[in-house]
Amino acid sequence: MKGCACLGILFVFLLSGCDRREQPLTWKAYGKNGAIASGNELATRAGMRVLRHGGNAADAAVATLLALSIKTIGAFCIGGEAPFMYYDAGSGRVKVLNGQGGAPLDEKAIDWYYAHGIPGSDIRAAAVPAVVDVCVTALKLFGSKSFAEVAAPSLEILDKGGPNWYRDTSDGDTVHTERDWYADLARTMRKLVEAETRQTGTREEKLQAVADRFYRGDIADDLERWYVEQGGFLRKRDLAAHVTRVEEPVTLNYKGYTVCKCGPWTQGPYVLQALRLLEGFDLKQMGHASADYIHVVTEAMKLALADRDEYYGDPQFAEVPLKALLSDEYTDLRSPLIEMKRASDAIRPGDPRAMRALLAGGGRSHPSMGGTTTCVAADRRGNVVSCTPSGLASRAGTGGATGITHGTRLVIFNTWPGHPNRMEPGKRPRTTLTPTLVLRDGRPILAISVAGGDMQDQAALQILLNVIEFGMNAEQAYAARRFSTGHFIGSFGQDEPGLASLNVSDSVSQRVLDELKRRGHHVTVIPGNVGGVAMLYLDQAAGMVTAMGGRSAGLE
């Protein structure tokens, strides 16, 4: 299926006023001293507790992530992944933490995948767990608190106990475990706190001891034993080799706004490609939710997604022509492919290397499961985090005695010869997880995190346009009905594309629906909205943050 089962309820919690009193939990709130929106009430409370005690946005986001890994199991897990974007108010710069794990280093394991395919829901589909290291890296580079301080709320949750089951969001089944995984995970988390406490030296050295115990110490030994027992391919050397890459964002100046995305190891840059294609159209004149607007944005997304499917992959293993994809020359070649009176019914990647509008021979029309949750945070100092945590559910159990439930992100790889996202030893899959930060005059105005697999950036793009093109406020931009297309190669199992498909809200008028169908769109009317969105809107002039979160619907 094209969509991704996502955690639908988002919780918002803010600090307000000089005394930093907490406002009640709600789907929308305002505050001056900090804000968090996430996919779970207890996780949001964990982050707010850290903010109340002087932590910054990075500290609060890590506390929120650790709690989310417990309370949103099936959508996110501590053995999963979490791309992490951080705006530092002191320097005015955005940094990206590559919180995605890689494939096994063993070439024989990779040969097995090419012979048998990539399984969708067992430990052989697990990438190296990335969450612990991205949390440690965020604390080292941006935070001010210790690991013990940010982990304390999660340990309290674990100590209260919970069910020995979780929901496998790939098909909705309840997965029962053989162990008390709350107790197991509590022991593992206490080992990490113990590693920090026992380590002498600087704060950074103490935090590094946390990662070392997980990836290179006795916890790694326990995980390796479990991998062997379960028939998995990961080993201790895979864990030991893992690092969180610290990167610059990919950016685009769109009508005075700087849109920041993670690199082509995510799907994020296609949003920038779509914006480039849309620069030459007067979207405001077309009118929001008009047939022209829905058509042109859909056609731009289809062209950008075709390039995603053709060129994106781990840039340490594949040469991704990103500069060319975002160039004026390439945009000028691709824009005329958008015909206002006719919907495209083909996958049409371009050729940025030869600077041609269309790739000779066409794209890779090769013949979804899981879940994601959300996390955005801001503090009173002006630091902002946008993070999209996930961990596609695994039926392999919860890490034996470690309690570390693993994701199945390797399903995003393919085994197509020569493709930039083909599986290779140690390579990271091109993930759908794609947080967004938007700056104006060098300061953040939007932080967006979306659950919904391939639909994540379709929702994010439309929220950006709602704000930039139509001047909507936070609530209007969040609530406005969104549309989506399945006109791409699905990331989870590489499904065949739904050519010319267009899913629109039941709030769209019949006149607009009829016109879209006349242009060749295969229209499906859906209730609700596309993508599970959490967002922060930062009004720099007023010093106010608006946080938004609510129940959304995605394609199944």
Image (cartoon, rainbow, N blue to C red):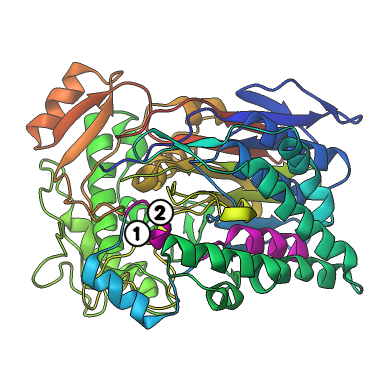
- Quarter of the image where one finds residue 292: top left
Residue at coordinates 17% horizontally, 49% vertically from top-left? Answer: 497
Q: State the residue in front, 520 or 541.
A: 520
Q: Is residue 158 magenta?
A: no
What residue is pinned by disc 2? 432
For residue 93, above or below residue 32:
below
> Can residue 52 be spotted in the picture?
yes
> Can residue 100 be spotted in the picture?
no
What residue is pinned by disc 1? 412
Decide if residue 299 is on the left or right side of residue 199.
left
Q: Pointers 2 and 1 in contact (CB under 8 A)?
A: yes
Decide if residue 363 is on the left or right side of residue 471.
left
Q: Which residues are magenta?
A: 120-142
| The N terminus lies in quadrant | top left
Q: Secondary structure at mark 1?
A: helix
Residue 321 appears at what percent x and percent y? 34, 75
Q: Amino acid at mark 2?
A: Thr
Q: State the residue in front, 226 or 237.
A: 226
Residue at coordinates 46% horizontally, 52% vertically from top-left? Answer: 433
Decide if residue 511 is on the left or right side of residue 391.
left
Residue 341 appears at what percent x and percent y? 11, 40
Decide if residue 339 is on the left or right side of residue 6.
left
| The C terminus lies in quadrant | top left
Q: Residues within 10 Å of mark 2 (few under 14, many from 20)?
A: many
Q: Secondary structure at mark 2?
A: loop
